[in-house]
């Protein structure tokens, strides 16, 4: 495949497909990740879907885009699996992914993100064995269900005055259990919380929460492309004179795990976001 026809660029291992000069195509984050790999900085592997695909999405829609990039995305996912020695959707040795925007101009917090893609009823058991921390895994899952429900399935509050339906459910469960903080909930409580979250998704949207990791991935990718034109992103672009036709790239990257238990200095569990290094706390 020629460089000009590529729509998906791998980064990880010892050599990335792109480099720092490709900011317009890979976005700021994607270009930086590629350059980090090229200069020898250890970076969890992943791939960048280009800004040109975002333009294609805006012009031709979801189905056209999926058909155009499906093979490249699958090929690059296999490269990530090889680097991570894990498999996306595998019940015994699951690989989790994050999906993040990455425009050529910095737009902090304006677009959407989905973390921990690949969690489902099957991979939960394998990840619990892999981490040795069942509570951590179920807490990550309930966070994923909430994030995906908000970002992809349209349950995000329309404004700051509206309550997040998932937050309401969680507060009700905490009251029932006499739990003051999120971390006071047991593994069993978190399982019940996920059950209630999924029921809320079904009741609100008429759709079941997706178990298939690939359905989760495609839903997340398209939701992040859609977020390029959400009200806050549109306002930000207008304020800072960022052309709408630039679009955003999308970075799909392997998730890695940090300290997951009481033996850590903080006594908390977290997932480290590999693209930014930030810790996603899980109680």
Image (cartoon, rainbow, N blue to C red):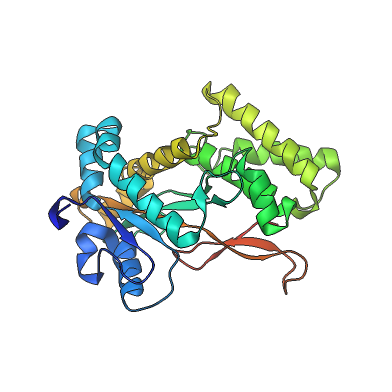
Residue 123 is situated, as x and y percent measured from the top left of the image, at 61, 44
Residue 17 vs residue 209: left or right?
left
Corner quadrant of residue 23: bottom left
User: Is residue 215 visible to us here?
Assistant: yes
Image spot of residue 260 (x, y percent): 69, 63
Quarter of the view holding residue 119: top right
Rendered position, 44 above or below 56 = below
- Residue 253 visible in the shown view: no
Q: Residue at x 74, y 51 (%)?
A: 135
Question: Residue 167: where, in percent of width, then height?
Answer: 65, 41
- The residue closer to the viewer here, 277 or 243, is 277
Residue lying at the far right in this picture: please name it: 178
Q: Residue 264 vs residue 55: left or right?
A: right
Q: Residue, x 52% and y 24% (percent of image)?
A: 205
Placement of the C terminus among the 4 image quadrants: bottom right
Q: Is residue 69 left or right of residue 269?
A: left
Tell me what residue is drawn at x 46 percent, y 66 percent. 276
Query: In the rendered view, would you say 255 is above or below 53?
Result: below
**Residue 138 % position (x, y):** 69, 47
Q: Nearer the viewer, residue 63 or 100?
A: 63
- Badge count: 0
Choose between 110 and 142: the one closer to the eye: 142
């Amino acid at each position: 495949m020629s460089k000009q026809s590529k729509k998906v660029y791998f980064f990880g291992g010892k050599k990335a497909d792109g480099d720092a000069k490709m900011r317009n195509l890979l976005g700021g984050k994607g270009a930086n990740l590629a350059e980090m790999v090229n200069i020898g900085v250890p970076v969890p592997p992943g791939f960048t879907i280009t800004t040109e695909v975002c333009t294609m999405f805006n012009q031709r829609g979801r189905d056209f885009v999926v058909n155009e990039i499906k093979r490249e995305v699958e090929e690059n996912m296999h490269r990530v699996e090889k680097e991570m020695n894990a498999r996306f959707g595998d019940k015994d040795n699951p690989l989790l992914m994050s999906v993040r925007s990455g425009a050529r101009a910095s737009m902090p917090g304006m677009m959407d993100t989905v973390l921990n893609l690949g969690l489902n009823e099957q991979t939960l058991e394998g990840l619990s064995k892999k981490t040795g921390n069942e509570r951590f895994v179920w807490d990550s899952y309930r966070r994923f269900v909430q994030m995906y429900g908000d970002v992809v399935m349209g349950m995000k509050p329309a404004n700051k005055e509206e309550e997040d339906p998932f937050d309401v459910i969680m507060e009700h469960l905490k009251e029932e259990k006499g739990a003051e903080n999120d971390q006071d909930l047991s593994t069993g409580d978190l399982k019940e919380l996920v059950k209630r979250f999924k029921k809320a998704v079904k009741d609100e949207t008429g759709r079941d929460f997706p178990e298939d990791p690939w359905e989760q991935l495609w839903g997340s990718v398209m939701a992040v492309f859609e977020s390029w034109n959400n009200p806050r992103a549109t306002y930000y672009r207008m304020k800072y004179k960022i052309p709408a036709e630039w679009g955003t790239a999308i970075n799909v990257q392997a998730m890695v795990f940090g300290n997951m238990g009481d033996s850590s200095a903080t006594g908390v569990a977290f997932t480290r976001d590999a693209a930014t290094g930030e810790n996603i706390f899980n109680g």
